[in-house]
Amino acid sequence: MRRTVNAALLALPALLPPLWGASAQAPGRNTLVVMREIDADNYDPPRSTARGAGEVAYMLSDTLVSLDWDQKTVRPGLAESWTVSEDGKLYTFKLRRGVTFCDGKPFTARDVAYTVTRWADPATRSPVRWRAGPVKEVRAVDDHTVEYELNEPYGELLYQLTLFFGSMVDQATVEKLGQNHGVQGFNGTGPYCWASWTPRQELVMTRHPNYNWGPPIYQNPSPQVERIVWRVVPEANTRLAGLQTGQGDVTQYIPYFALPQLRAVPSVKLSKQENYFWDHFMGFKVDKPVVNDPAVRRAVNLAVNRAAIAQAAFFGAATPADAYLNPNVAGFDPEAAKMVPSFNPDEARKVLDEAGWKPGPDGVRVKDGQRASFVVYAISTQIARVQSEAIQADLRRVGVEMRIQLWDATVAWGKLATQEFDAFFMSYPYISATDAFALYFDSRNRPTPNRMNWVDPETDRLLAEAKTALDPAVRERAIAGAQRRVSEANVWLPLAREQLWVASGPRVEGVRAHGIYGIGLYKGLDIRLTR
């Protein structure tokens, strides 16, 4: 592999012409080209959970509050300040003055009320509407004061409001475009404005001329670049080539095999986020044949060599996941981590034997006429391909057949909201144990993001207690209980804990990896071009 990597890096310019495509041209003097591996399904903040949607949404609009580089401290955003009532049910936000949408319309408290009400409305069908909290009413007291009232306390509301799902939207634009909002256009308060989107190719945005209200974590409250092109470049070698030839300026989608060599390239700068929680896993639909058997799910966990997969897929730039959560995250429960089986293929075979799954004539186990075979769906990425093929081989060795179906990102999210598959690969960001488990294991979040169809009243009770508890100790006990129930049932196969690196080319300055929801550039306000 080392010879292949070095050859790729040395011959990058030669790779560029046949791979870059029809849009190959040097960026303009004040145009930043951001290269990414896949596109998003849409750019309407409450209607997509794709990282690709968030990358763009954070630049097209703003949230009430922002998140510091430490991934823990909430800072001002569109709200300059806020207060919380003693019972934890009423948040009062004081808004910045002088904020405008891209079309020049003043931003007011009525826009906040509309945005959050739409986000929380079941009719919007937001897969993450629970993140807005148990909303009772969001109201504009005056142009610059918002009252955000909840039916019950929600201890993590401020963090959730830093996420792009709560990015402010313009009511007139939403009503004009309907389901095409975030597909055919967008009018936000962010540092950049929507220009065009060609799915699976590129999204173009231009500088918001009035913008000077960026989060306080940046040195520059205004954007420094005139135009940004988010270009889809699926091939890893082509992204590397783009960095060195100047046809691409920045990317967080760095092939892990290239990290050691990129560190030695003088023209490429690397920024790493040390505070990063982004995990990869395979989830099982626990009500589908074969994977509805707890013995099969346990055997899969025993049969898969996570360390080998982390090395193959990430070239050592990821940690094998031996638990459902990173042990550094708030609310992590060590006892739940002990319930996750370690690699032991002999034990996997024993578990299957004892559960009545006997080897068939082709080596695939059979029980009551049912073959130990299941279908897994995933977004088509290099990591997904490597992970799925390695797991497929590991499972075949213990008599389980896994059939793989990979989908382009523009259709994958729709496919992953169906009941067509038995298991799926996913990676996701989180900031706490409560944040992670409330996302995936609340029964109300079916069919997505609770794609496992996990329905357990006790899990729901524990999650509700963790979300509403005002006492941190009560919250930790509750979320620990939820982790233990899910881990014991082997609802997931934890795979790897990812790292975040952002690479930038020779004419780019000011890039710093942020990491919110796995997103490298966040607002990108300190980024500037030297030529």
Image: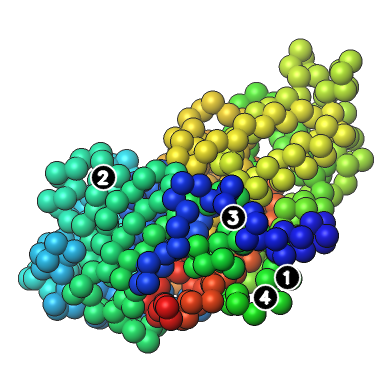
Residue 265, label in figure: 4
Q: Real-space Cα distance between discs 2 and 3?
A: 31 Å
Circle nearer the N terminus (3, 4): 3
**Quick check: 381 above or below 156?**
above
Sort mark 3 into few (<14), some (14-19) or many (20+) by Cα contacts within 10 Å.
Answer: some
Residue located beneath label 3 in the image: 16
Asked if the residues shown at circle 3 and circle 4 are in contact, with their CB atoms under 8 angstroms apart, the answer is no
Q: Is residue 517 left or right of residue 120?
A: right
Task: State the residue position of label 2.
Answer: 184
Residue located 53% across and 51% down the image? 20
Which residue matches tag 1?
261
Report the residue that reaches farthest toward the top.
369
Q: Residue at x 14, y 44 (%)?
A: 176
Examine the rendering and report whether any part of residue 325 can be seen.
Answer: no
Q: Amino acid at mark 4?
A: Val
Q: Earlier in the sequence, mark 1 or mark 2?
A: 2
Callout 1 touching callout 4 (CB < 8 Å): yes
